Image: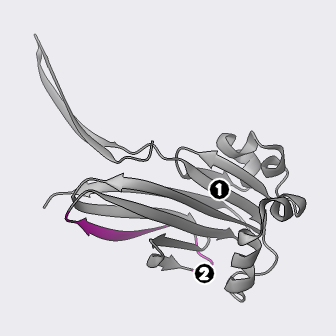
Amino acid sequence: PGRVCPYRLRVVHEGGRFETEGLVAPANWRIRLFPSPTDPRDDAERWRAAAETDAASLLERGGALLTVPEIDFDFGMAGPAAVPALAADEAARSMPADGFGLVAETTLVFPPGRWRLRTVSDDGVRLLRDGEVLIERWDRHGATEDVAELRLDEETAVDLRIEWFELDGAATLRFDLERLDD
């Protein structure tokens, strides 16, 4: 966990040859899931403060603290209860279907190269690398893809942070990585 590992698989058999390549990036995403105290579009600082409170306060306000290996959440219309990785936690399962937020953080070690970071979100999303905003779509929208690119000259540990909110209706949040050819 914590390393971005590109792979290439070649299978040679009596009927021919098969090749595929991809990326394995197991992570330990630390998630803070919480009911939104405000519309984050109007008061993002108050919204972020709710996410940053100490663990006991977050839990007392109906939030949840979890660790998951990937960010791939199709909440549909049901909120966290619809996502098995989150619904295993009682507090997350009890979260409302609308009006909640999520902050996810991890550190990944990337090999050198060019990388595409992609989010798919409904509603608002921010992706930060080491505190620098790479993607910001802090508004109400349907499922929308946003991308950012990184160029790393050497193996680099990168702190990633995703901030995301759900206002109402259907909801989704996904994060993917892709290695780009140089």
In the image, residue 93 sits, relative to residue 142, either above or below, namely: above
- Pointer 2 or 1: first along the chain: 1
* Residues at marks 2 and 1 touching, judged by CB atoms closer than 8 Å: no
What is the quadrant of residue 39 in the picture? bottom right
> Is 144 part of what is drawn in magenta?
yes
Total of numbered circles in the picture?
A: 2
- SS for tag 2? loop
Give, as a three-letter code, the residue at label 1: Ile
Q: Which residues are magenta?
A: 138-153
In the image, residue 62 sits, relative to residue 140, either above or below, namely: above
Give, as a three-letter code, the residue at label 2: Asp
Residue at 25% x, 53% y is: 111
In the picture of the structure, the residue carrying the numbered disc 2 is: 139
The image position of residue 91, as x and y in percent, is: 83, 50
What is the quadrant of residue 17 in the picture? top left
Residue at 77% x, 43% y is: 89
The image position of residue 118, as x and y in percent, is: 41, 63
Quadrant location of the C terminus in the rendered image = bottom left
| Tag shown at residue 31 | 1
Q: Nearer the viewer, residue 130 or 85?
A: 130
- SS for tag 1? strand
